[in-house]
Image: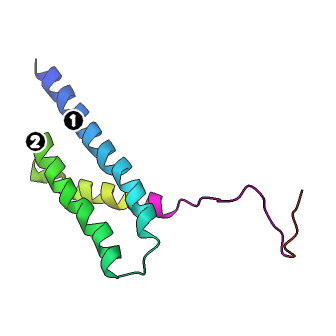
Amino acid sequence: MSSFINSHHYVVLVSFFSVILIGNIPVGYYRKRFARFSRPWARCIYIPILVNIVLRRFFGLGYAIVPFTILAILAGQFIGARIKLNHSDTRYDKRDSVSN
């Protein structure tokens, strides 16, 4: 019976960290358009921390995982900030002519 409880606890932890990590990727992508240390930039950092607190309480997790959740938030925002989307289907060389 105790192995079921432990495995259930691991499922809760993995699902919690997955939600935190995947949820912060779009926030990191959105955050990169603002100037550093501006008010909207700071909101993109601190609002996910508040959501993290609510989710941690919802999942019934203690304070022992707080450093790991902060790492998951930062990792998700770092991954999101590194996403580069190409908005056009054609690539141009230095002379602004279409390359094959």
Q: Which residues are magenta?
A: 77-94
Q: Position of residue 38 (x, y in %)?
A: 34, 82
Question: Is 90 in front, or is 66?
Answer: 90
Residue drawn 45% across the image and 59% down it: 80
Q: Is residue 42 above or below residue 75?
A: below
User: Going by the image, does 46 lie left or right of 63?
Assistant: right
Q: Which is more toward the observer, 24 or 10? A: 24
Q: Which residue is mark 2?
A: 60
**Residue 98, above or below 72:** below
Q: Position of residue 27 (x, y in %)?
A: 38, 60
Could one spot residue 57 in this view of the protein?
yes
The picture places residue 41, in percent across and down from the top left corner, at 35, 74
Front residue of this view, candidates 56 and 84: 84
Which residue in the protein does label 1 denote? 12
Residue 74 on the magenta segment: no
Q: Amino acid type of disc 1?
A: Val
Say whether residue 61 is visible: no
First in sequence: mark 1 vs mark 2: 1
What is the C-alpha distance between the residues marked 1 and 2? Answer: 9 Å
79 in magenta: yes
- Check the image and report above or below for 50 versus 39: above
Q: Which residue is drawn at the image coordinates 10% and 41% (left, top)?
A: 60
Q: Are marks 1 and 2 in contact (CB under 8 Å)?
A: yes
Q: Which residue does the image show at 60% across and 58% down from the upper left?
A: 85
> Where, quadrant-wise, is the N terminus in this rendering?
top left
Return the x and y of residue 32 as percentages of the image width and height. 46, 70
Disc 1 element: helix
Picture quadrant of residue 44: bottom left
Amino acid type of the residue tagged 2 in the rendering = Gly
Q: Tell me the residue at 22%/58% (across/down).
A: 67
Give the position of the C terminus as an image quadrant: bottom right
Q: Secondary structure at mark 2?
A: loop
